[in-house]
Image: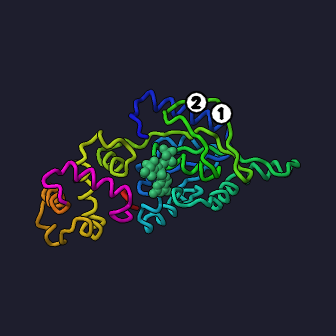
Amino acid sequence: ATIQWYPGHMNKAKNQLEDNLDLIDVLIEVLDARLPVSSRNPMIGQLTKKKPHIIVLNKADLADPIQTKKWTRYYQDEGNFVISMDAQHTTNMTSLFKIIKLAGKEKTDKLIAKGASNPMIRVAIAGIPNCGKSTIINRMVGRNAAIVGDKPGVTRGQSWLKTKTNVQILDTPGILWPKFSDQEVGYKLAACGAIKADIFHPDDVALFVIEFLKQNYRDDLVKFARISSEEMDSMSNPDLLLAMTNKYGMRDDYDKFSLFMLQRLRKGKLGRITFDLR
Ligand code: G4P
């Protein structure tokens, strides 16, 4: 579910988001909790000024809980509604509905003052590919709503998905492009599976991950590598990659091992790791 982004795609996606903003009361921006900065659309701040805005730090089960707390506070301090969640394993969306009601309160209060009894709050979900938009929508709807359109800028006939509450969801999630500001951001996105890994060589991504873990999550790396911390210090990263490849019985096929390691990382098997550190 990854997309090659071109300027044309970005423009279409931007226009689609702007059109959708006219239809909704609250925008739900889904970020990958492992990448609270890198998974953020670079234009989202400007685009959503007019509407109440909720940031969901999703895949919190895979992220470093201390970092998630810090990023939650950070985005709250910026004036956003923020919630972290694990949409894959949580079926109960009560907390999300609560925060949507809070974000939509200004609108509903006005309508209630005019005599409406249970005014609708209309939301759209937006975020980069693979951050969990469809999963969240399915959880909110409470069944497997068919969601199509994993292409940027594809506007279909708009329709609304109903939930058990007075919240309705625009059926097409807004697919946004991530930051592409530098190589490091690219590696982070690739490591988490947010952009196609084949943009990079897997061993380059693996080497990036090894260096990042060495610096920031050393214990997790030592555990996964099956190599002691002291031994690690005496090795270059490519030597370490090769040594790990050996340890895992893949001889010198470090490409194969690199892919394996990235798969394990994405499943959280190396530990709970956040790549954008606060
Ligand atoms: P999208 O619409 O934004 O493109 O994302 P989607 O919901 O399709 O989710 C992408 C992948 O991320 C899915 O896995 C989904 O199960 C997983 N996912 C979504 N939310 C969470 C979460 O909070 N925690 C975890 N750990 N995973 C989450 P997949 O790649 O389609 O299948 P698989 O990886 O389960 O095999």
Query: Which range of residues does the magenta coloring cover?
Result: 249-273
Within 10 Å of disc 2 (Cα), the crowding (few <14, some 14-19, many 20+) is some
Q: Secondary structure at mark 1?
A: loop
| Residue 23 versus residue 267 in the image, above or below | above
Within 10 Å of disc 1 (Cα), the crowding (few <14, some 14-19, many 20+) is few
- In the image: residue 3, left or right of residue 239: right
Q: Amino acid at mark 1?
A: Gln
Residue 205 locus on image (x, y percent): 26, 49
Q: Secondary structure at mark 2?
A: loop
Ligand 1 has an atom within 8 Å of the beta carbon of the residue at disc 1: no
- In the image: residue 249, left or right of residue 265: left
Q: Quadrant of the N terminus?
A: top left
Residue 2 visible somewhere in the drawing:
yes
Q: Which residue is at 60% across, 50% downward? A: 53
Residue 137 locus on image (x, y percent): 59, 48
Q: Which residue is mark 1?
A: 158
Q: Which residue is at 59% across, 40% downward? A: 146
Residue 122 locus on image (x, y percent): 69, 44
Q: Which residue is mark 2?
A: 155
Residue 258 locus on image (x, y percent): 24, 52
Callouts 2 and 1 close, C-beta under 8 Å: yes
Residue 250 highlighted magenta (yes or no): yes
Q: Residue furthest top?
A: 8
- In the image: residue 40, left or right of residue 105: left
Residue 131 visible somewhere in the drawing:
no
Q: Which residue is at 59% across, 49% downward? A: 138
Task: Point out which mark residue 136 bears.
Answer: none
Front residue of 133/187: it is 133
